[in-house]
Amino acid sequence: MTDLQYLSINAAAPLIRSGELSPVELTRAHFQRIEALDQQLHAFITVTREMAVEAAYQAEEEIRTGHYRGPLHGIPIAHKDFIWTKGIRTTGHSRFLKDWVPTENATVFERLRDAGAICLGKTSLHEFAFGSPGPDEAFPAARNPWNPDYAPGSSSSGSGAAVAAGLCMGATGTDTAGSIRHPASVCGIVGIKPTFGRVSTYGVIPLAASLDHVGPMTRTVRDNATMLQVMAGYDARDPYSVDHSIPDFQRLIGRSIRGVRIGVPRRFIESIPHKPEMLDAFANAEKALGELGAATCDIEVPGLELASDVTVLILAYEAYQYHKANLEAHPDQFGATFKQRVLKAAQYSNTDYRHALEKGKELRAAYAFVFASGIDVIISPGREGPADSMAQLLADPAKRGVTNRMYNLTGMPALTLPMGFSSQGLPLGLQIASRHFAEEMIYQVAAAYEAAAGWCERHPSL
């Protein structure tokens, strides 16, 4: 059964299509895994066993009768509990929505369901994607499957833990300031924040609408591209959705990266206090990419040092506007850390907000200049170090990294994948970004590194 949980989506799909692997068997194997481990990991808030098994039987019959929908047909996945699911509670990991059941589905849920993916349930997060684990939270905080004394990142923490632990084969996450890429980095999986507007956010509880992204979290790069292929696409119901052509995201996977030009924001990276083993792993990754034929060079991005603070201001301002009325009417329904973070934004004026938006435009222009110079992708450490311990997080709930936010501010696509392990056996991540709508280039570079490094073949010893 353990072998089934760690099958990749792209390994399982042909077996399902040929009838060698039953979607029912695969789904039940994942529920056995959830039953065995989730009391320890708390990756799920809600498990939808009956619905999932019914969907698995339906998938099996459809495939048997020649109605195969594609590589996600019969594949068990999970959804961050920020994504509306009709008839299934969607809590945002908050007491305020503890028993709320949406009357419609999010677009991304429907697209994955219509492709045949089977929903196992809804995964944990930080309260409204902005809080932090604490003694007053509505549900237990997710734990890192590599070591449950450590955190699995923020805020798509449950999705990261579930994918890494083999509780599901893929999951959805949301990313407003790094919340897909942080869990990917510290859980040793692959997570992408696609180009802003590439994936619909309709039916996703907003944190900061101008920064919010939805993306897939998987154990391999190819699986990630497989999920994004279904999730991407224009949606008229989402005012931020972009009507842009959808390429074959796997088109460049497997191709040589010889001649690819990789930019390294060296001075910016050196300005951030990283753990030495993270920098060592990054140096090894840069060397490996060079040995694969890529050319690396240092780049300067004016204004990059301001990106984190500017993103936080926009995020907090928009979150405050969204939650203000409910916080005033029902203050006891929200956790202390979430309230502290959101209410801090009351100090920001409309002028502050508009100024921050202008800084974002300036940074986008600066990156456009870098790419116009011939750079194909940009690499950096996926985080300052490995996972924080739960004790550290509880002692300092305001702690946040600064390595991811620039790509929310600019809307550029960015992916994090495994880059090695710390001396304590905790995952380290590599971040790869590119120009708008160049996800297939990111996948090309990520897949080449993944194949050479082999880190995706390691799993937690649970």
Image: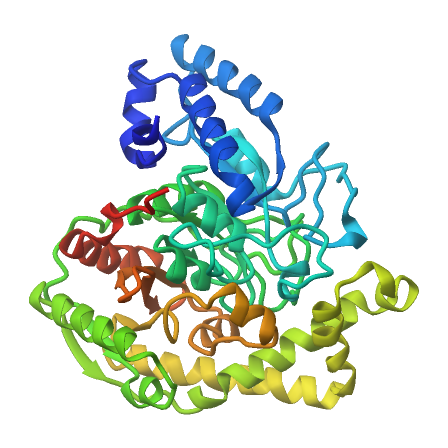
Q: Position of residue 41 (x, y in %)?
A: 51, 46
* Outermost residue, top side: 65
Which quadrant of the figure contains the N terminus?
top left
Q: Position of residue 27 (x, y in %)?
A: 46, 24
Give the number of callouts. Answer: 0
Q: Quadrant of residue 279?
A: bottom left
Q: Say which of 30 and 442 sits in front.
A: 30
Q: Say which of 226 and 87 sits in front.
A: 87
Q: Vertically, is 459 above or below 267?
A: above
Q: Vertically, is 356 above or below 376?
A: below
From the viewer's perspective, is 245 left or right of 19?
right
Q: Position of residue 239 (x, y in %)?
A: 65, 58
Q: Say which of 172 and 338 sits in front.
A: 338
**Residue 116 at least partly seen:** no
Q: Quadrant of residue 450?
A: bottom left
- Residue lying at 30% horizontally and 59% vertically, measured from the top left: 425
- Residue lying at 30% horizontally and 33% vertically, measured from the top left: 7
From the viewer's perspective, is 338 left or right of 278?
right
Q: Vertically, is 41 above or below 265?
A: above
- Residue lying at 41% horizontally and 42% vertically, measured from the top left: 227
- Residue lying at 42% horizontally and 65% vertically, measured from the top left: 387
Which quadrant of the figure contains the C terminus?
top left
From the viewer's perspective, is 171 left or right of 330?
left
From the viewer's perspective, is 123 left or right of 127?
left
**Residue 105 at least partly seen:** yes
Q: Vertically, is 240 above or below 372?
A: above
Q: Position of residue 157 (x, y in %)?
A: 52, 55
Rendered image coloring scheme: rainbow
Q: Quadrant of residue 434?
A: bottom left
